[in-house]
Image (spheres, grey):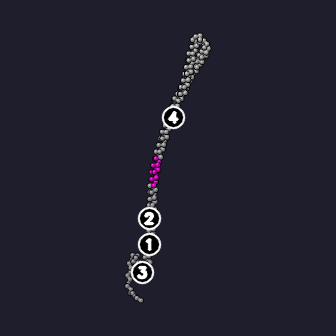
Amino acid sequence: MRMTLLPIAALSLAGGIVLGVAADADTAGEAAHAGDAGKGFAVVAKEVRDLSAAARDTGKSIGYKLGLISTALAQIVTTNERVSSREEAAVTASEQHIHDVLEHFRQRTRLLSEIAARSSAESESIRGEVCEALVQLQFQDRTAQILQQVVASIAQAQQLDTRAGEQTYTTAEQRQTHAGGEADQVAPQGTTFL
């Protein structure tokens, strides 16, 4: 603000000098009225007075206009300071808002990362349980297949045993004894050697 008003102060000083010149000219004009010796200067003194009046009026006009300019510049500076202050407050508020948004984003990102980690751990646990269940189902299926094979083999063995028993008996009494009956008494026979 001071740098802006320095030229105005210089112009005010110049206006003061012009008013001072006008006052000096008035004094010179008064000296011309002093006597007979001053009569020759009457025409010059009148011109000097007119010039002095014009200089005084110009000095006053310059001073008045400089005052208006100074007031306008002071108002502009005050307005600029207010605008600058408001802009600074707006920038500070914007920075705070951006900081808040970024912090909210960081918190959400952290939360999502935690959820993803938990989901991954739970997914791994579920995968392990599913694999274990598949192994158990495969074991049960294989056990069922083996049991079916054993049952089928036992049934085949019983059929073979029944048939085998009939074929391996050499006498009717053996078959009858096997079937739960009693064997007939057979008379002893003699043995003949050849």
Q: Do the numbered discs 2 and 3 sit on residues whose CB atoms are within 8 Å?
A: no
Residue 87 is labelled as 4
Q: Amino acid at mark 3?
A: Thr
Q: What residue sits right under mark 3 in the picture?
A: 171
Q: Amino acid at mark 4?
A: Glu
Percent of width and height locating residue 70: 54, 26
- Name the residue located 43 percent from the left edge and 74 percent from the top edge: 161
The quarter of the picture where residue 176 lies is bottom left
- Name the residue located 38 percent from the left edge and 84 percent from the top edge: 187
Q: Which region is colored magenta?
A: 110-124
Residue 157 is labelled as 1
In three-dimensional space, the C-alpha distance between marks 2 and 1, rounded to whole angstroms, equals 20 Å
Q: Do the numbered discs 4 and 3 sit on residues whose CB atoms are within 8 Å?
A: no
Tell me which label, 2 or 3, sits earlier in the chain: 2
In three-dimensional space, the C-alpha distance between marks 1 and 3, rounded to whole angstroms, equals 23 Å
In three-dimensional space, the C-alpha distance between marks 2 and 3, rounded to whole angstroms, equals 43 Å
Q: Amino acid at mark 1?
A: Ala
- Name the residue located 46 percent from the left edge and 56 percent from the top edge: 127
Percent of width and height locating residue 114: 45, 49
Q: What residue sits right under mark 2 in the picture?
A: 143
Percent of width and height locating residue 47: 61, 16
Tell me which label, 1 or 3, sits earlier in the chain: 1
Secondary structure of residue under mark 3: loop
- Name the residue located 50 percent from the left edge and 35 percent from the top edge: 88
The quarter of the picture where residue 148 lies is bottom left
* 114 drawn magenta: yes
In three-dimensional space, the C-alpha distance between marks 2 and 4, rounded to whole angstroms, equals 82 Å
Secondary structure of residue under mark 1: helix
Tell me which label, 2 or 1, sits earlier in the chain: 2
